[in-house]
Image (tube, helix red, strand yellow):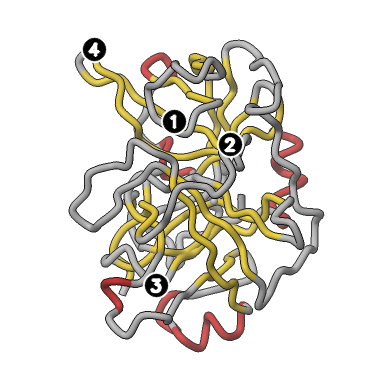
Amino acid sequence: MKVFAFLCVVATAMAIPGPDKRIVKGSPPAVLFAHPHQASIQVNNNGDWHHMCGGSLIADNKVLTAAHCLEGQTASKMRVEFGTVTLFDASNGYEQIVSVSSFVIHADYNPNSAGIPNDIGLIYLSSTVTLNEHVQIATLAPSGSSFDNTKCFISGFGFTSKSGPVSPQLLEVKLTQLTTDDCASRWPEENINIKHICIFDDSETDPTTRPGACMGDSGGPMMCGDTFEYLAGVTSWGGSSCSGKLLFERFGIEWELCKEM
């Protein structure tokens, strides 16, 4: 049963229905700054900045995220943090924080549509970021790419359990991508289609302890390929337990749209 979207992948990855955010049972990247394209999208609440969603740098002034992360938001109250594996920590010397100029949501996005398709949005930064070893543009998966039955990395600063809180440290987990047919047969009620990338982990008998994404991970990257070099999807939604089932928006299908955006 869908329960929430993870406010916090380039294809929309299904993990939890309805808006939500986390990397459950994840671990810090084995290599520091292994995800230099990773962004933390933050909002201002009464003068304090809070992590809301993940995102991926796809140009020096553009961040790809999930549409549900941008619903109801105001650009002037948003900013994006790059170059860190620890939130709000400038001690590494590479952190960059850039304000948001504007954003757009996929014209066909409808949070009430079965399967929540077209869950992608694009943030325009008010200035360009400085690219370096720790802040880099993600390589987008070529249109038509398939990573069925292969391992992909997802990463984020989201909840580490269903009840939170967000992780101050960037976490990652490697999970297997299912074929569209396999995913649809497992969850026929979710209206799975070619726009979705489905990830599922059944390594744990108890579904509540399986690795996955959660609140705060929405909009974050799913990296696939032989060396996990391609941004293939955007974290979208999953199961209410934040474990096991995850759905991503398949980026390749929206590539032309993103170029136009």
Which label belongs to residue 33?
Answer: 2
Residue where numbered disc 4 is placed: 47
Q: Residue at x 69, y 55 (%)?
A: 228
In this rendering, which labeled residue sits more in front, label 3 or label 1?
Answer: 3
Above or below, comparing residue 155 to residue 90 in the picture: below
Give amino acid for label 4.
Gly
Real-space CA distance between mark 2 and mark 1, rounded to the nearest whole angstrom? 17 Å
Q: Residues within 10 Å of mark 1 (few under 14, many from 20)?
A: many
- Residue nearest the observer in this picture, 177 or 46: 177
Q: In 3D space, how far apart are the residues under numbered discs 3 and 2 (Cα atoms)?
A: 26 Å
Q: Which image quadrant for residue 50?
A: top left
| 140 over 127 or under it: above or below | below
- The image position of residue 54, as x and y in percent, is 47, 40
Q: Earlier in the sequence, mark 3 or mark 2?
A: 2
22 left or right, relative to 80? left
Residue pointed to by mark 1? 41
Amino acid found under the numbered disc labelled 2: Phe
